[in-house]
Image (cartoon, helix red, strand yellow):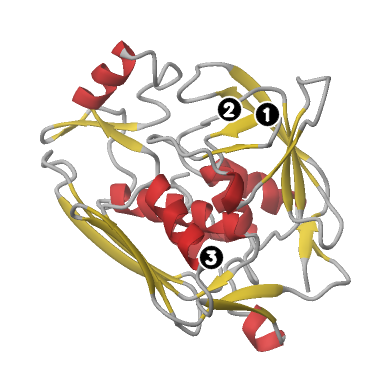
Amino acid sequence: MQTTIKSAVTFHGVGLHSGKRARLVIHPASAEHGIWFKRSDIHLGDRLVPARWDVVNQTPLCTRIENPQGVSVSTIEHVMAALAGCGVHNALIEIDGPEVPILDGSAAAFVRGILSRGIVQLSAPVRAIEVLQPVEVRSGDAWARLEPNENLTIDFSIQFEDAAIGVQRKKLNMSNGSFVRELCDSRTFCRQADVDAMREQGLALGGTLENAVVVDGEDVLSPGGLRHRDEAVRHKMLDALGDLALAGAPIIGAYTGNRAGHAMTNDLLCKMMREPGAFRMIVCDGATAARLPGAGVHLGEIPAVA
């Protein structure tokens, strides 16, 4: 059955790129509602923005959605990953600013808030997107692919010059709460050189060593070091789940990304949605629903480091 959160949960924090404080509230929603954002700081016109692949306004550093009136919400990938990873299909996310709070740079606080409120089933079946044929996008040595599989898997590879990151690869079956156990606490990361460049361009104004893993060569500059040896690739997988959640329904298929970012994953969704025969919508039976991300997850599965 479709689900929503039992009661509203509130978060406060600054946006990673804007540096502006925002209050975000995840509200319960009815069956067939889907995930929508509402800008409570805007008082005229359409304040609602659907969390959907075809309203993404691509930017290099985060995922931003925008409605036809130009109302936008950016850096939505972590809260979207938390909702998908906890198996929440319907929610209204109210926010009083243009950017979702970065919190500690991971999705763990969103996951903890959602699971602490609890998940309730609704009187409507879950529909999922079943990938029927391979779809791929490429740009230079970066690429992303979706292909048929019996459940959602994410296989991601990255390569950075800084020895603190280097070459990393990880693959996970996303069924039965593996997002909460394996990925939700992994923080966004960047190189010190990139931080300096972004600051010169007026970006990353809310970034600190407390809400991002910053590396410089072999050194991890953030206090406490890494939560996982491969925290960087785990965070890329977290981002990928959040971006795939903009499909509007759980995806049943294998996602593979190599040096892929937010824009590339959105390009992949756009290509799949517009390619005849690439997918079909199915109504999930009990066995299929039990293999979707978030099915059966509980609060005790959040890693102790988060």
Q: Nearer the viewer, residue 61 or 11?
A: 61
Whether the residues at callouts 2 and 1 have beta carbons within 8 Å, the answer is: no
Q: Which mark is residue 274?
A: 3
> What amino acid is labelled 1 in the image?
Val
Q: Which mark is residue 71?
A: 1
Image quadrant for the N terminus?
bottom right
**Foreground of the two, 179 or 202:** 202
What's the residue type where badge 3 is placed? Arg
Q: Which residue is mark 2?
A: 99
**Residue 202 drawn above or below residue 48:** above
Residue 173 in percent (x, y) is at 43, 73
The three-letter amino acid code for the residue at tag 2 is Glu
Instruction: Determine whether the residue tagged by mark 1 lies in a helix, strand or loop.
Output: loop
SS at badge 3: helix
Tell how many labels.
Answer: 3
Quadrant of the rendered image containing residue 56: top right
Q: Residue at x 62, y 25 (%)?
A: 98
- Which is nearer the N-term, disc 2 or disc 1? 1
Residue 5 picture location, percent across and down? 77, 53
Task: Give the quarter of the image for residue 187.
Answer: top left
Measure the alpha-carbon separation of dots 1 and 3: 25 Å
Q: Is residue 115 left or right of residue 46?
A: left
